[in-house]
Image (cartoon, rainbow, N blue to C red):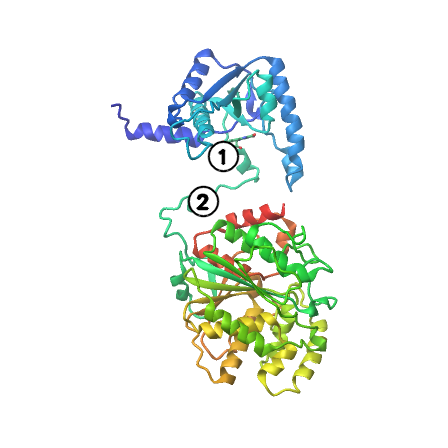
Amino acid sequence: MRRYDKDSAKLLLDIMANRRDVRGDSFIEGSIGDDELDMILQAGLYAPSVGYSQPWKFIIIEDEATKSFVYHNFKKSFKKSKKRFKHRKEYAKLKLEALQEAPLHIAVFYHNSGGDILGQTSQDDVGRYSIATAIENMWLMARALNIGLGWVSILESKKIRKRLNLGSAYELVGYLCLGRVDKFLDKPQLQINGWEYQKSRQESIIYDSKNRGSSRDISTIIGDKSYLDDFIDKEADFMLLMSYAKSSKIKGISQAGIKNKMYLTPTLDAEFIKTGKLKSLKKLPKTSKGVPTPATITRAIEVLSPFKDMKFVSLGLPKNPQIGSKSLRYYDIPATKRLDKGADFDALGIFNLGVSYAKEFKVKGEYLIISESIPSGTTSALASALALGYDADGLFSSSFSKNPNKIKEKIIKKALKMASCYDDLFDKLSVVSDNMLLFCAGFVLEVNSKYPIVLAGGTQMASVLLIINSISRYMGVDFDSSKLSLWTTKWIVKDKNSDIKALLQMVDFPINAFYSDFDFSYSNYPSLKKYDKGEAKEGVGAGGALIYGYLNGLHKREITKQIEGFIK
Ligand SMILES: Cc1cc2nc3c(=O)[nH]c(=O)nc-3n(C[C@H](O)[C@H](O)[C@H](O)COP(=O)(O)O)c2cc1C
């Protein structure tokens, strides 16, 4: 058996570290010698292959007419590909091939024999992966010979195959350009020009799949951060409480969704989170300033680190989401009315619906994250807090960067006047509150810390806590908050027009509340950047989902990329 010493291993690592994809702007005059080509091909032939199938075919191309054909095919494909990129101008400037400059091309094909191959019985693509291992071997050998090699994949593979007189049993995997260079870049070109960044080892490597999360990027609003220790690397159920309040029709009060179709926002949010698709309307809800719904954030987390289970509760929605009946719980109740005319709903009845749902609900994961989607919900949340006697003026946020206080004040004033006629707490809430707040309060009070619950949201969820506080006082029940916490976004906590901490300090029971450090500092998408300027801020459980993601080992960059993928 041949043994290598550490220096040989270090040399191999060094060649790997200094291997570069070489594009045409780096090539100099000079051809590749036959002995060099032979070593590069031999390296390819030494590659591992599934079932030792060696499904490769290397086509050496020196003919100028064929090279020119491939170049023109690249030009056409590149032109077409430009449309796909948000940053089209930057993309157009990239040099992504060396087809004209390279004296030698090698097209590497996969031969799909159609027969059964050992090892290729479960994953069909492993034959193609065998070609990629051969190409990497060739790439490393070329580098060891100080020869430049670039991989070009912006090509119509069928057209290239036909031009090379190969039948449909062959599939192009890699088209390589080889030539002389006088220097290799220290770092990947796409890193140097800022197109991509180098991932940290932490981002790419997981040493133990059961032990990867941390609370490092999470901060405390109120309470004790060590509370989060029990949630690290644990799976949670996600519940979305969806409701509609006719107040959202009042001009300027909310911007949570598509103009004139605000009532569809919770429906579309639910469809997107659950399926990644929009069924009831092919439009992602956006604010009037073009900021995509926070459902994109929650969906990103579901795609990267799935929740154990998802439940969607429909509380007075004009249209139920199309997500399959298993995950939907539908209550045939009306939407709450415009607040300035009195919300006019059965607050006690809805509270009791929350209580009974909690009685039958079985949590599948280790804890439950409850979120909400209700356009204009911050108005009823504020009105509820005020009606219950909390000094909450100016402490509630909105989906706007500047809270539309004047409009809200006018409406709430009217609602509070109507509510003041009643002594009973639930009668008061029937005038000023909404279905989500009461249902959520009932649910949480009934669970009473039998298992951990996270209220995922901003000041609306703080309002739920205030309602729970008042109801438990009013009914004289002992509420156990030891397993209850609130998780939200940084945008809520940093909001100058509201104060979630002050709201949380008003409850009599101890409460832990946290926010994730997530923002869009890694994104160049203007519509996402607006989150960092205070637009949208929170909703559909975005803050809770982000903390869940962090606790399960996700990184800001990968979350950002996933969200960008939804809105490109
Ligand atoms: C499967 C595959 C396809 C690639 N296709 C292209 C391509 O079409 N054009 C290009 O310029 N580079 C292409 N590359 C090269 C990568 O952009 C390059 O490997 C990456 O940016 C890292 O840089 P480095 O190889 O110089 O370290 C490809 C690489 C791989 C592995």
The mark lying in front, picked from 2 and 1, is 2
Q: Say which quarter of the image contains residue 18.
A: top left
Q: What secondary structure is found at the residue carrying circle 1?
A: loop
Q: Residue at x 52, y 50 (%)?
A: 559
Callout 2 crowding tier (Cα within 10 Å): few <14, some 14–19, many ≥20: few
Ligand 1 under 8 Å from disc 1 Cβ: yes
Callout 1 crowding tier (Cα within 10 Å): few <14, some 14–19, many ≥20: some
- Seen from the viewer's position, the closer of residues 417 and 169 is 169
Report the residue marked by disc 1.
Answer: 187
Report the residue marked by disc 2.
Answer: 200
The answer to whether residue 84 is left or right of residue 119 is right
- The answer to which of marks 2 and 1 sits earlier in the sequence is 1
Place of residue 50 in the rendered image (x, y in percent of width and height, measured from the top left): 40, 28
Amino acid identity at mark 2: Ser
Q: Say which quarter of the image contains residue 192.
A: top right
Residue 511's place in the image compared with 475, above or below, is above
Amino acid identity at mark 1: Lys
Residue 498's place in the image compared with 262, above or below, is below
Residue 463 appears in the picture as rendered: no
Place of residue 202 in the rendered image (x, y in percent of width and height, measured from the top left): 42, 47
Residue 227's place in the image compared with 139, above or below, is below
* Quadrant of image for the C terminus: top right
Residue 98 appears in the picture as rendered: yes
Q: Say which quarter of the image contains residue 319.
A: bottom right
Rendered image: mark on residue 71: none
Q: Residue at x 66, y 35 (%)?
A: 82
Place of residue 86 in the rendered image (x, y in percent of width and height, measured from the top left): 65, 42
The number of numbered badges drawn on the structure is 2
Place of residue 146 in the rendered image (x, y in percent of width and height, measured from the top left): 46, 22
